[in-house]
Structures are given as C-alpha cells and as structure tokens.
Amino acid sequence: MNWLLYFFWLIIFLAGVIVTYILPEASLSLFERFAILGIWGASLGCILGILASKSATRKHTAKMDFEAALTPVKPPETQLIPIVNGVQASAKTETTEIPILPPVAMKSSFQKEVHSTAPKSTSNSQILFPLNTWHLFCRGILKNRPFHEIIGKLGQCLPEMFPNASGILYMYSDNQSELHQVLSFGKHSVGEPVITPVECASFSRAEIVVADYSSPSLSGGCTHLHHRPVGYSFCAPIEGLEEHFGILTLQVDALPSGETPDSWKAKISIVSATFGLFVANQNLNLRFQTHSIRDTLTGLFNRRYMEESLQREVAAATRHRTPIGMIMIHPDAIEALRETRGPHAVEQMLWELAQRLPRYIRYEDIPCRYHNETLCVILPGADLDITEERAEKIRHEIENLQVTYGNTILETTLSIGVAMLPQHANNSSELIELAEQALAQATAKGRNRVCTAQVSI
C-alpha cells in the first residue's frame, strides 16, 4: 500500500471527526453524530480501496512487462536462397546453419573480399607517410631536444614525406620584419633566402595556401614562389599559442601516383602544427629563463644571476690565474630627477642607460642591475688597465647623453667604482664590497669620476 495515500486518508478522516465533534449539541443528537462518522469512514474506505487496487494493478503490469523484456526472443528461422549466375535456384526448406568465424578469420575474409572487388586503378591510393623518420622527429620533440637537432630530423623527414618536392622552411630572425631560410630540400630552388611576411598569402590568411599552376584562373597567392611556378605549391604558417614563427613552403612538378593535393595538404598540416607547437614550447622556455635571470625594467641581468655568474668566474679565474674586473655605476642625477620629474623619469633614465651600456663593453662582459639605481659590469679576464679604460669610456659616453622626455631633456653624469681580483680582493664578496667602497668614494669626491679601490692584498 502507498503509505503516502494512507496518510492523506487518515488526515481527511480525522478532519471529519473533528468537524462532527465541534458541532453544537442542539443541532445533532449523539446517535446522528455516530451515524455521520460511520458513513464518512465507509466512504473514505471505499475510495482508499479503489485507489489501492489500481496501484497494485499497475505494479503487476509493470512487473510482467519487465519479465517479458528479460525473456530472450527466439530468432526466426531463416532460409538460405543461393543465387547462381543471376538465376534464383530452388529454395531449401530446411534451415541452413551459418558458421561463426573468429575475429581474425572474419577480418581476413573481409579484406580478401574487398581486395577482390576493388578496382585495379585504386590499388596505389595509399598516402605515403614515412613512419620511421616521423617517429624519430616526434621523439626528439617529446624529449625537448635542441632546436638545431629538431631541424636536422625535420630535414630528413620532409623529403620522404613529400617525394620529388622542393621546399624551404622560413623562420623569423631577431626582428619580425624578415623571414630567413633555416632549412631547404629538393633539387630546385623555389624562393629567395630572405622574404618578408607580406609576400606569403598564408601569413595573412593564417591557413595553408595551395596553388595549382595548371589552372588558368590562378591569381594572387604567394609572390615569393616565383622561381618555379610549375605544378603545385603549398605554403603553411608555422604557428603555436597564437604566435607566428615562420612559413613552410613546398613545390612539386607533379604529385606522386595515388596522392592528391588534399592528401599533401593534410600531411603538411600535420608537420606545420607539430613543429609550430615545438617552437612555441621552446619560446616559452626561453622567456621563462630570460625572466628568471633578467631585470624587468632594464633588461640587464638581475642580482641573483650576477652573484651566481661572479662565483663561477671567480672559480675559473682562480683555476687559470686570470684577473676579473668589476665596475660599479650610479647615475648622479637620480635623486634630482626623482624630486623634480617623479619616479617614471628615473625609470626612463635607467632604461636608457641599460640600452647603451652593452655598447661600451666587450661581448664576454656581464652587465647587471645590482641594486635599485646601481648598475655593475663583470669583466672576466680584464686587467686593471682594461677595466679602468672601459669605466672611463662609459662615463664619457653617458656624460654627453641627452634623452628626450616629453618636452624636457634628461641627462646625467656617472659615479663609477672599480675593483679587481686578485689585485684588490680574494673572493667574490670582497670584490663586490670593494667596488661599492670605490663607488662611494667617487660620489664623495664630487661625482662624475672613476675611483679605483686602493686596498692591496
């Protein structure tokens, strides 16, 4: 029985009892009250019985349907009516049992049937894909091998994947205005060693561009493919993480038998997407390393990298008995700029100094931002004369520097301190301390000068 239904029936019955009880005594006698209650209870009982009977009938019907659904249905008997030469043979009345083949046998039987019924002209329609070289290429990417090694594996894979084709892989150099050739293959020259992005239609469309030079309606497209406008050309952008890194371009006089422009487009799409994600990952790693060792404002090496590099250079200098020079630099006009122009003018001045500092030192020297407005340069292998000469050159060049800042000109002089290892210090911490002392001495003597540490070890 539905307990919810019984609960409602009980509430309704009790409501009738309460109503009968609260009626005035003058209106109904005691006998009449009991008679009304009896009739009320009997009526509700009949209604409850009818509802309970219907509920039981529905449950029984649902149970029967469920059991019937679980009962397996006997498959109908079938007859095998063979067809011989298009003429219907006499039907057999007995049921023919069809043997069940194992999966391997079924696969082989199906393959035999397909090969026997397939036209002879489509037997060579398989897309050529060099699995071995492609596996080596992907394995190198998954192991995050160096860029030049991946380029070498790609150079081995492309000629096998695109037979009889010639191609060039263009990548951006230091700027984003030119694309330089980093890989070429094939016997034909299909483009210049350096092109601009606007010469390739795949750059603006951000999709693979296919050109059929046999089509008379061909117009536009990639203007950099003017060396050999024969057959088909394919240009695919090398992209990853919404950044554009280069272009892969291919040219083939005639497609191999069994392949189509769509199949080549699919293959070049796989190559460009895989290589693009690799380049994007390399780019992210480079940015992470750069941000971890570079100062955000100036772009110079930060103090942590300076201290680690100095320890390595000191160890190498001690082993090879070579000197190390250190130049500590502080702009003299920083305090005045902060008071008159604000902190942004100070940042602008520091940035300008950081952009010019590498021009006045050697390639192997290490320019760093030491602390706040103080810069420093580590000079491995430089003796005292070379270090002082570089310090004077920096001071002289910055003394004549004028930086446009809004409607004013920013300019400053430099106070510079110089210290040497092993002439002045025995280790990295002493070298930094003596360079700071020499810088403080230059500031105390009137600024705009170079002072050398005088401590002798």
Image (spheres, helix red, strand yellow):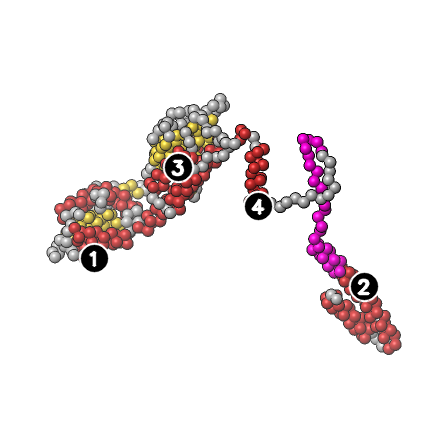
- What residue would you read off at disc 2? 50
Q: Is residue 61 magenta?
A: yes
Q: Secondary structure at mark 3?
A: helix
Q: Secondary structure at mark 2?
A: helix
Q: Is residue 155 magenta?
A: no
**Residue mark closest to the camera, 4 vs 2:** 4
Q: Nearer the viewer, residue 4 or 271?
A: 271
User: Earlier along the polypeptide chain: callout 4 or callout 3?
Assistant: 4
Q: Tell me the kind of residue under disc 1.
A: Ser
Residue 53 seen in this snapshot = yes
Q: Tell me the kind of residue under disc 4.
A: Pro
- What residue would you read off at disc 3? 157
Q: Residue 429: which disc?
A: 1
- What residue would you read off at disc 4? 103
Q: Are marks 1 and 4 in contact (CB under 8 Å)?
A: no
Q: Are marks 4 and 2 in contact (CB under 8 Å)?
A: no
Residue lying farthest to the top in this orientation: 216
Where 439 sits versus 176, above or below?
Answer: below
Q: Tell me the kind of residue under disc 2.
A: Ile
Mark 3 burial class by Cα count in 10 Å: few <14, some 14-19, many 20+: many
Question: Residue sitting at 39 percent across and 30 percent down?
Answer: 166
Cα–Cα gap, marks 1 and 4: 76 Å
User: Earlier along the polypeptide chain: callout 1 or callout 3?
Assistant: 3
Question: Residue sitting at 26 percent across and 54 percent down?
Answer: 308
Where 168 sits versus 24, above or below?
Answer: above
Cα–Cα gap, marks 4 and 3: 36 Å
